Image: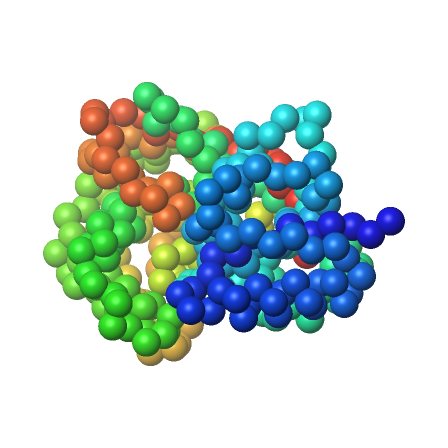
Amino acid sequence: MKETILILHNPKAGDKDHQKNELVNAIKEAGYNAIYSSIRQKKWQKIDKAIDIILIVGGDGTVRKVASVLLKRTWLDKKLLLSLLPMGTANNVALTLGSPDNIKKLLNRLAKKNIKKVDVGAVDLGVEQNFFLESFGVGLLPKLMREMEKIKTDNLESKEDEISLALHTLLTISLSYEARQAHITIDGKKITGKYLLIEVLNICSIGPNLKLAPEADMTDGLFEVVLLEEGQRDVFIEYVKNVALGKTKKGPWKIIRGRDIQIQWDGTWIHVDDEYVQLKDKTDLLVEVRPQILDFLS
C-alpha cells in the first residue's frame, strides 16, 4: 500500500504553481501518494487520517507552525514522520538536522527511513506556556527581532541580503545595548551576572546564522545554554563581523548543558523561536526539555 505524503508549503509570490507541480510530480514518481496544501490557505492545519508523512517546504517559521499543530495531537493519533525541504532565509533547523536541499535527495533519504526523535523545549512564562524547537532567550536577540520588524525588506533581492542586513543591524545594536542583571539556575547550579544575551538552544545556529552552540543536538535531551557576559561585548562584535564576512570562528561565550533552566532577568522582552513577546511583569522564566517528541527524517 502506498504511503501518503502531505506537502505543507509556504510558497513565494509567483512561484506557487511551478513549485507545487514539481513537488507533487517528484513524489508520485517516487511511488507515494501526494496531497498539496499551502500554509497560506485556510484550514491547512486539518490533517487527514490517510497522511503518513509530512513534507515541510519553507523556513524555520513554517517548521514551527507545523510543529505547533502536531504538538496538539494526542497519543492516540497516528505518529507522523516530518521531513524538511528548506526554502526560508536562515533555515537554522534544517542546518542542525542536516536536511537535504532538493527534493530528489530528500526522497532518496525517505526510502531509508532513518529517523531522528527530536526534543522540544517547554517554557513557563508565568501567565502562559509556550514551546520552542530552536531557542528561547533574552537580551540581544529579542532586540534584534524588534528592530528588524521596523525595517522594510521588500527591496532585498536574496536571502543572503536579508541575513547581511540582520547581521549589520545586530552590530549596531551590540555597540550600545545595556547588559542586564540575571540569576540563572541550570539543573540546580546557580549563576549570577550581567549579560548581553542568554539563549537556551536546541539547535546549533539561530537568527542570521549565528552558530552559538556548534555541538547542539536536537535528540540528546539537553539544551545548550549560552551566556554572553557584559565584558565580552567587543569580542562578540568581532565575531559578528567575521560571520558577516563569511568567516567562522568559535565564539567567546560560555556554554552550559542542562535540562531544567530557571532565569530571573531584569527585563521584560523575550523571544520563543522567531516570535518576540513583552511580558507584563518580570517573572521567573522556567524552561524544561521534552525529549524525543517529534520524528524528523534524518
User: Seen from this angle, which residue lies furthest right?
Assistant: 1
Of 155 and 180, which appears nearest the observer? Answer: 155
Q: Is residue 66 above or below residue 29?
A: above
Q: Position of residue 53 (x, y in %)?
A: 69, 48
Quadrant location of the C terminus? bottom right
Please indicate whether residue 76 sits to the left or right of residue 46 in the image.
Answer: right
Q: Is residue 76 visible?
A: yes
Whether 227 is drawn above or below 19: the answer is above
* Residue 269, quarter of the rendered image: top left
Foreground residue among 85 and 182: 85
Residue 259 visible within the image: no
Q: Position of residue 58 (x, y in %)?
A: 49, 58
Query: For the point 40% across and 46% down, which residue is it?
Result: 273
What residue is shown at x 87% (from left), y 49% (from top)? 1
Residue 52 relative to residue 54: left or right: right
Residue lying at 80% horizontally and 61% vertically, measured from the top left: 31
